[in-house]
Image (cartoon, helix red, strand yellow):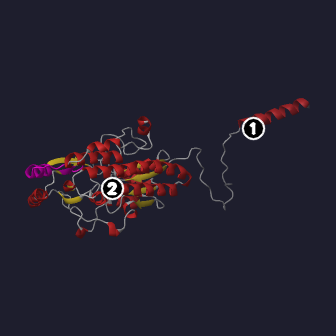
Amino acid sequence: MKTSAWLLILSLSLTACNAPQNTTVSPNSGDTGATAQPVQSQTKSKLTVVTTVAPITNIVSNIAGDRTQVKGIIPEGSDSHTFEPRPSDADLLSKANLIIVNGLRLEAPTEKLAKTSKPKETNIYELGNNTITEAQWIYDFSFPKEKGDPNPHLWVNPKYAEAYAKLAAKQLTQLDPEGKEYYEKNLNNYLQRLNELDKVTREVVASIPAKNRKLLTYHDSWAYWAREYGFEVIGAIQPSDFKEPSAQDVAKLIDQIRKVGVPAIFGSEVYPSKVEEQIAREAKVKIANTSDDELPGTGSANAIENTNPQHTYIGMMANNLRIIAENLGGNPQLVDKLNTTNVVGPATTANK
C-alpha cells in the first residue's frame, strides 16, 4: 500500500511538471453570454505611426525612438504637393495606429487615401493646423491667396519645428500612455538641439549684411523662416501651378533681381530647373541649391534606422544655413558648432 501511494504521488508530480507554464484561459464555449477576449501576446507588438515628408518623419521618430514604429510615406526628393501614393501605401495606412501629416493642404492626395484606408479609430493629426492659426497663414508667389492654399512649409522655421516635436510627443503619449516618460525624455533632448539650431540661425543671419537679407528661391518654401529671422522673400521662380515660369515671368524676375541687387538666388534640390540657371546668368548673380524636404546625403529619415549624422532635419537646416551664408556674405563657419545628430538611434551612439 505504501508503494502504491508513493507511485500515485510521483505520477501527479510529473503531470504538474509537464503542464504548460503560460496558459490562456478562454471563456467557456458553452457560455453563450460570454464575449471572447483576444489572447495577449507575451511580446507586445509596436504601434505604427505613419508620417509623410522626410523632415516630419525625422522629427517624429526622434521622439518615438524605438518604442513606436515610424513609417514615412513620401520618398525624399519627391514633390510632396503632387505626390500620388502607391497601392502599397494603402496597405500601410490600413495598419496605422496614428497618422501624422503636415496639413495646410500639403499632402492632399495622401490624406485622401488615408481617410479611405485607415482603421476607423485611427486619428489623422495635422501638425501645421495645430501650430499656427489661420490668421498666421502666409500667401505668396507660389501660394497666392486667390488659389486658396496657404504656404504649408512651417517646419523650415526651427521654432515651428519645436512646436511639431511637442505636438508629436503629445500624440504619441495619448496613443501609448505607458511610454510617457520615454517620450518626454526624447522630447527634452531634441528640444535642446532645436534651441541650439535657432540660436545659430540668428547668429548666421546677423553675420549677413542687412542689404543682402533677401531671398529669391525656386520653390516658395522659406516664407515662415524669413518672417521669423528678419529676411525678405522677394520672389519665387516656380509659379503657383508648379510648372516652369513663362518667358515673361523670367524677364520680370531678372529685372527684379537687378533692381534689388541681391548677390545670389537659390534653386531647389527637389525641383531641378534650367530656368534658374538662365536667370542667374542673365542677372549676373550666383546660384546655389537649398532644400526644404530632402535630408542631406544618404540615410533613413527614421532616426532609429539612420547611421548618417548629417541625414537629419537639423542636418538639412545646417546645410541650408551654410549655403545661404556663403552666398549672401555671411559667416558659414558659425554653423560648425551645431550637433546635427539624432537624439536616438545608431548614429547617436556612433557620434558619442
Does dot 1 land on a helix, a strand or a loop? helix
Image side of residue 201 versus residue 121, left or right: left
Residue 351 position within the rendered picture, expressed as x and y whole percent measured from the top left: 41, 36
Mark 1 lies on residue? 16
Q: Nearer the viewer, mark 1 or mark 2?
A: 2
Residues packed near mark 1 inside 10 Å, few (<14), some (14 to 19) or many (20 plus): few
Does dot 2 land on a helix, a strand or a loop? loop
Mark 2 lies on residue? 157
Residue 55: image tag: none
Name the kind of residue labelled 2 in the image: Asn
The image quarter containing residue 107 is bottom left
| Front residue (pair 2, 92) | 92
The image quarter containing residue 113 is bottom left
| Front residue (pair 286, 246) | 286
- Image quadrant occupied by the C terminus: top left
Residue 217 in sight = no
| Front residue (pair 146, 254) | 254
